[in-house]
Amino acid sequence: MDGGTCSESVLAELTRFHNVPLFFLQTDQVKKKLFGALPYIERIEFIKTLPQTLQVTLFSSNTSLVLFFPENNTHAFLSPQGKITHVTPTKPEKALSISIPGRIGRVGDVYTPEELRDFTVLRNAMEEHTSLYGAEWKNTHEITLFLPEGKKALLSSKELEKQIRTLQLLLNEATMIEHILVIDLRFAHPVLR
């Protein structure tokens, strides 16, 4: 899959067809097995090269972001439409995930456009500002960003982008927040504790 390598689940599905001669291999059966094992796959292409080579190309659906559910220790892939397409116990490499405590993510669960917007803004903030270690979304009124040295920023959905810009300005004033542990941006003016 990534960089020419296959995940264990892909190899496991393909090894079931190991003793089938390539000439007689029904790719529809392989597709069915792979789609069942990997629900986030959108399309599969096969190229048969005789005598015994089968090239499998998997095209995943556009994953908007990854959510982490600590209640059952799983990571869920969220589509751009806000639907969970796949759940896995391991965090995808290089993925920025947003923690969602108090919930269990299941394939097919759908988030509202407002929640999806929050998740997207948080993911973009973490991509843009590498000093952000993680994000936790409890609801639209309780969003936490984790900062270096055990510091936290408390946010809400209302004007989330503006709150993140304000946070970045505060972080740039390092001497001002040196002894501050919590930056609460949920109100009209930042509260520093």
Image: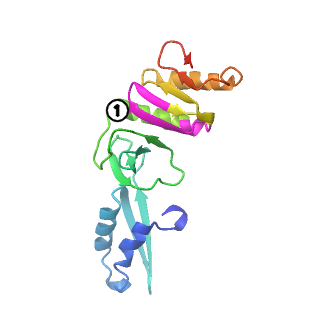
The picture places residue 123, in percent across and down from the top left corner, at 49, 38
At horizontal 32% and vertical 37% (from top left) the residue drawn is: 111
Q: Is residue 59 magenta?
A: no
Q: Is residue 132 magenta?
A: yes
The picture places residue 79, in percent across and down from the top left corner, at 37, 45
| Quadrant position of residue 41 | bottom left
Please tell me whether residue 30 is drawn above or below residue 40 in the rendered image. below
Q: Quadrant of the C terminus?
A: top right
Per the image, label 1 sits on a secondary structure element best described as helix
At horizontal 61% and vertical 26% (from top left) the residue drawn is: 168
Q: Which residues are magenta?
A: 126-144
CA neighbours of label 1 inside 10 A, class few (<14), some (14 to 19), many (20+): few
Residue indicated by mark 1: 113
Pick the residue in front: 5 or 68.
68
Pick the residue in front: 85 or 176.
176
The chosen color scheme is rainbow
Q: Is residue 191 left or right of residue 156?
A: right
